Image (cartoon, grey):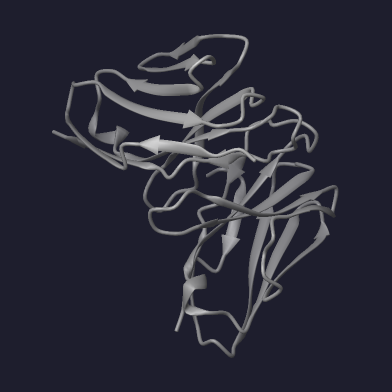
Amino acid sequence: ETGVTQTPRHLVMGMTNKKSLKCEQHLGHNAMYWYKQSAKKPLELMFVYNFKEQTENNSVPSRFSPECPNSSHLFLHLHTLQPEDSALYLCASSQDPSHTGELFFGEGSRLTVL
Amino acid sequence: GENVEQHPSTLSVQEGDSAVIKCTYSDSASNYFPWYKQELGKGSQLIIDIRSNVGEKKDQRIAVTLNKTAKHFSLHITETQPEDSAVYFCAASLYNQGGKLIFGQGTELSVKP
């Protein structure tokens, strides 16, 4: 248990669906992240939020829309995805947004786009 | 930008043997190098990290070495046990870059009893 909870753990959706991934951290951290993990590829940083403000968008397509209503919750809204978007989406948090401290990862949401 | 290469992609060892995973990075300004362990069905967890002001760091059976000149760093696991079986990721970043870790491709380690 890392203190970062992701739901759902598994999601199957069609290309025309709209769904959302949720992440919640119980660690009192100020920074939250979305990473994409595809088979045989490095983890790819997608978005960074510091104190609820987005500070990094790593050239992510607009069909991925993040939302951070507060420092403890992070969402990834999905719409009109492509099959190549199928991957494990990992949420992480860290204490201090200005320094590279330890990242605490959730277990991930396995997304399959049909 | 930073690029991290990790090898091998898979590694199988007998219980009790040592395992070594190697990573190279491209940005000479990177100064923070963590290693994460991802077990099946669990979130990735930091197992050890090293900053560029040291060349080696040990924590029980795990050690990391850093060669700044060659821009590579390695994870060493001694006396491997079946519970060491997992995917290991190396990463690199600048310490003041707010969590912008650049990860390697991962190494799937299998320790056979």
In depth, the one of A106 and A45 nearer the eye is: A45
Give x and y (percent) for residue A70. Answer: 83, 57
The residue shown at (41%, 36%) is B6
Occupied quadrant, residue B101: top right
Q: Residue at x 47, y 71 (%)?
A: A86
Up-down relation of residue B27 to residue B108 (above or below): above
Residue at x 58%, y 80% (from the top left corner): A81
Q: Is residue B77 left or right of residue B113?
A: right
Q: Residue B55's x, y, as percent?
A: 51, 9
How many marks the image carries: the answer is 0
Residue B62: x and y in percent read: 39, 19
Instruction: Assign the C terminus of chain A to one quadrant of the image.
Output: bottom left
As drawn, B90 above or below B28: below
* Residue A68: quadrant of the picture: bottom right
Q: Whole-percent x and y of residue B43? A: 49, 47
Q: Quadrant of residue B51?
A: top right
Q: Residue furthest bottom?
A: A16
Q: Of residues B4 and B51, which is closer to you in this image?
A: B4
Left/right of residue B22 with respect to residue B33 in the rendered view: left
Determine the residue positioned at 57% across, 52% down.
Answer: A44
Does residue B113 appear to the left or right of A15 in the view shown?
A: left
